[in-house]
Amino acid sequence: MFFAHGDWKIIVKNNCVLQWFSGYWNEEAAIQYSQEFSEQTQHLKGEPWAIISFLDDWILAVPEVELHGIDHSRQLKDDGCIKHCHVYAPSALKGIQLERMVLPTEGDYERRVFDEISSAISWLESCGFLIDVDAINTGALEIERAI
């Protein structure tokens, strides 16, 4: 087994998960991240909730990560996630890999991609989710220190 390569930060505020990703990910990082995500979001199961994923500092992942991404995506949808925002500067490579790892919009679950945080926040707020901007700023600073 290898060491996890890739970083993440997860903050849960009310019924919204804020998460940041950075680096180039290997399979071990995907496994550890999924376990941590499940632990931190356990209390949200069965209620509608949302996610904002900040991906500007995420580079990409080895192909083995994609299967874990699909499983993780199914699990969060099954657990009650109904809105999922990806926020990153336009990148064809990121878009292609994320499309292979994350479920598309279907039923109550809706995923959108934004290139600005403010647009993602506005959309989620229009869907009834209260976003803690201070938590976003705190998480962004913490992930910058980790890079």
Image: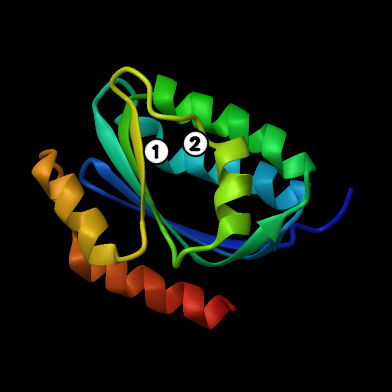
Q: Relative to 107, is 9 on the left or the right? A: right
- Give the residue at mark 2: 38
Q: Is residue 26 left or right of residue 127?
A: right
Residue 31 in the image, given as x and y percentages of width and height:
68, 42
Give me the residue at 54% from left, 60% from top: 8
- Across and down, in percent, residue 59 comes to 64, 65
Furthest-bottom residue in view?
145
Q: What residue would you read off at disc 1?
A: 41
Q: Is residue 135 above or below residue 37?
A: below
Between 104 and 144, the one lying in front of the other is: 104
Tell me which amino acid carries mark 2.
Ser
Disc 2 on helix, strand or loop? helix
Q: Position of residue 97 (x, y in %)?
A: 63, 47
Question: As drawn, which residue projects farthest toward the right?
Answer: 1
Task: Identify residue type, mark 1.
Answer: Thr
Count of number-bearing discs: 2
